[in-house]
């Protein structure tokens, strides 16, 4: 698990956000951000390449091998040597042939070896670069806008690669400003960072937020500092909205209401929770 606890980050216009959320490991975690959010800095925080100036990041994952990071802007304008993919999976000629067929399908004549492709269309470049990152990295990879400009064929191929790598125990974090991904990706954990500085996260995959509310009971909780990890340890919680560093809305699955409430009361006795109350769903929707 990777926990962001009161981590300060600024977007590209200087607006500040305080981040409280977690990333289960292993998992496919989708993080939705505002359009001008500094996704690259967030990715480097997740990978441990940089440390925040304010707040803490607790990483309970032992990172193995190369840290994987895909950034569309870094892929643009580069020549592509497809033979490099074979150095990752030396016997995976199926992938190699598949990429050759994709290149032919998009109008490239393939007759030279090693294959050095210049001026490749961005969608193809993004797909191949994402696959390269997923195969080269160890047990943690972060992809920034990997579905950007992909058509249906390339979209399906990338999704297949992500699911296959997840099945082998890899943690894959997708960071995007495209809210449509919520409906089209089979993620296991969702984090939505909103412009009003509220953060919604859940390990379910609701079709809509209203459907999610129908299945849960929202409770407003005020906690002591550095208590986020204690709340996240409660498996009966289906989601959480972080209002500020001490105030949360937590969502209890209705079928587990009594069990979960007893755990919350226990945390209140231990003075981890200062106060809690059930709130109206209409208030949460605001």
Image (tube, rainbow, N blue to C red):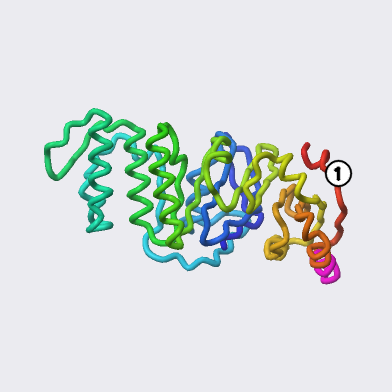
* Main SS class of the magenta portion in the image: helix
Rendered view: 148 above or below 280: above
Q: Does the magenta run of residues contain 185?
A: no
Q: Give the image location of residue 193, x and y in percent.
A: 63, 43
Q: Residue at x 60, y 59 (%)?
A: 3
Residue 277 visible within the image: yes
- Does residue 219 appear to the left or right of 114 in the view shown? right
Q: Residue at x 23, y 40 (%)?
A: 100
Q: Secondary structure at mark 1?
A: loop
Query: Where does the C terminus fall, quadrant-wise?
Result: top right
Rendered view: 285 above or below 226: above
Q: Where are the magenta residues, as a range?
A: 264-272
Q: Residue at x 62, y 49 (%)?
A: 8
Which of the 4 quarters of the picture holds residue 13?
Answer: top right
Q: Give the image location of residue 28, x and y in percent.
A: 52, 53
Q: Mark 1 — residue?
A: 280
Q: Residue at x 48, y 68 (%)?
A: 62
Which of the 4 quarters of the picture holds residue 165?
Answer: bottom left
- Does residue 281 appear to the left or right of 170 in the view shown? right
- Does residue 121 appear to the left or right of 261 in the view shown? left
In this view, the residue farthest toward the left is 112
Residue 226 visible within the image: no
Query: Where does the N terminus fall, quadrant-wise?
Result: bottom right
Q: Give the image location of residue 183, x and y in percent.
A: 57, 39
């Amino acid at each position: 698990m990777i926990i962001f606890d009161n981590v300060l980050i600024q977007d590209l216009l200087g607006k500040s956000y305080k981040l409280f959320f977690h990333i289960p490991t292993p998992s496919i975690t989708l993080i939705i951000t505002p359009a001008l959010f500094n996704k690259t800095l967030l990715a480097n925080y997740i990978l441990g390449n940089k440390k925040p100036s304010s707040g803490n990041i607790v990483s309970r994952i032992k990172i193995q091998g190369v840290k994987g990071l895909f950034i569309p802007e870094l892929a643009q304008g580069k020549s592509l040597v497809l033979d490099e993919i074979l150095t990752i999976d030396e016997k995976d000629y199926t992938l190699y042939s598949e990429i050759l067929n994709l290149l032919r399908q998009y109008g490239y004549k393939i007759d030279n070896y090693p294959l050095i492709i210049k001026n490749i269309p961005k969608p193809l470049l993004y797909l191949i670069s994402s696959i390269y990152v997923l195969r080269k990295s160890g047990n943690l990879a972060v992809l920034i806008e990997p579905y950007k400009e992909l058509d249906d064929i390339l979209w399906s191929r990338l999704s297949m690669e992500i699911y296959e790598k997840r099945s082998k125990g890899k943690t894959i974090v997708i960071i995007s400003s495209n809210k449509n991904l919520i409906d089209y990706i089979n993620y296991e954990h969702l984090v939505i960072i909103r412009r009003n500085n509220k953060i919604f996260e859940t390990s379910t995959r609701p079709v809509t937020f209203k459907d999610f509310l129908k299945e849960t009971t929202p409770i407003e909780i005020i906690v002591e500092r550095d208590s986020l990890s204690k709340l996240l340890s409660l498996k009966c919680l289906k989601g959480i909205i972080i209002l500020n560093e001490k105030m949360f809305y937590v969502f209890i699955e209705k079928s587990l209401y009594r069990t979960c409430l007893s755990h919350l009361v226990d945390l209140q006795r231990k003075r981890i929770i200062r106060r809690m109350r059930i709130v109206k769903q209409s208030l949460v929707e605001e």
